């Protein structure tokens, strides 16, 4: 039996086709971490997610809504201010 070194295992895991683990936060935690977004403003984005482009940023697990940090800020960056 061949002994596998820990570094080798990590290299194999990085090359696999498994999806990366995303960082999800609750509305309350997201609002605490990023004070520019209040809980109410996040709830408005969630309620209107089908029309505002933020649909891919939120996941519902049971009654809890989770926010994908990376997807959220990618959407914020891609949004244009209308004049």
Image (cartoon, rainbow, N blue to C red):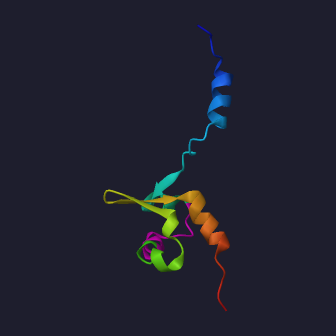
- Most extreme residue toward the left is 63
Residue 8 versus residue 69 in the image, above or below = above
Which residues, given as a range, are shown in magenta?
34-45
Residue 4 versus residue 51 in the image, above or below = above
Query: In the rendered view of the protein, which quadrant contains the C terminus?
Result: bottom right
- Most extreme residue toward the top is 1
Check if residue 6 falls in the magenta segment: no
Percent position (x, y) of residue 49? 47, 74
Residue 71 versus residue 36 in the image, above or below = above
Query: In the rendered view of the protein, which quadrant contains the N terminus?
Result: top right
Whether residue 34 sits left or right of residue 78 in the image: it is left
Percent position (x, y) of residue 76? 62, 71
Residue at image point 44% right, 71% down:
46
Whether residue 43 sits left or right of residue 77 in the image: it is left
Residue at image point 62% right, 10% down:
2
Residue 35 versus residue 61 in the image, above or below = below
Residue at image point 63% right, 25% down:
9
Examine the image and state in which quarter residue 13 appears: top right
Examine the image and state in which quarter residue 73 appears: bottom right
Figure label count? 0
Percent position (x, y) of residue 4? 63, 16
Check if residue 44 falls in the magenta segment: yes
The one of 83 and 49 positioned closer to us in this rendering? 49
Examine the image and state in which quarter residue 8 appears: top right
The one of 64 and 34 positioned closer to us in this rendering? 64
Residue at image point 43% right, 74% down:
40
């Amino acid at each position: 039996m061949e002994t596998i070194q820990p570094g080798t295992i990590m290299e194999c895991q990085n090359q696999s086709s498994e999806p990366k683990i995303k960082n999800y936060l609750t509305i309350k935690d997201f609002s605490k971490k990023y004070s520019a977004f209040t809980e109410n403003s996040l709830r408005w984005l969630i309620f209107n997610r089908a029309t505002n482009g933020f649909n891919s940023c939120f996941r519902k697990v049971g009654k809890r809504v989770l926010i994908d940090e990376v997807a959220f800020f990618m959407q914020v960056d891609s949004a244009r201010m209308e004049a």
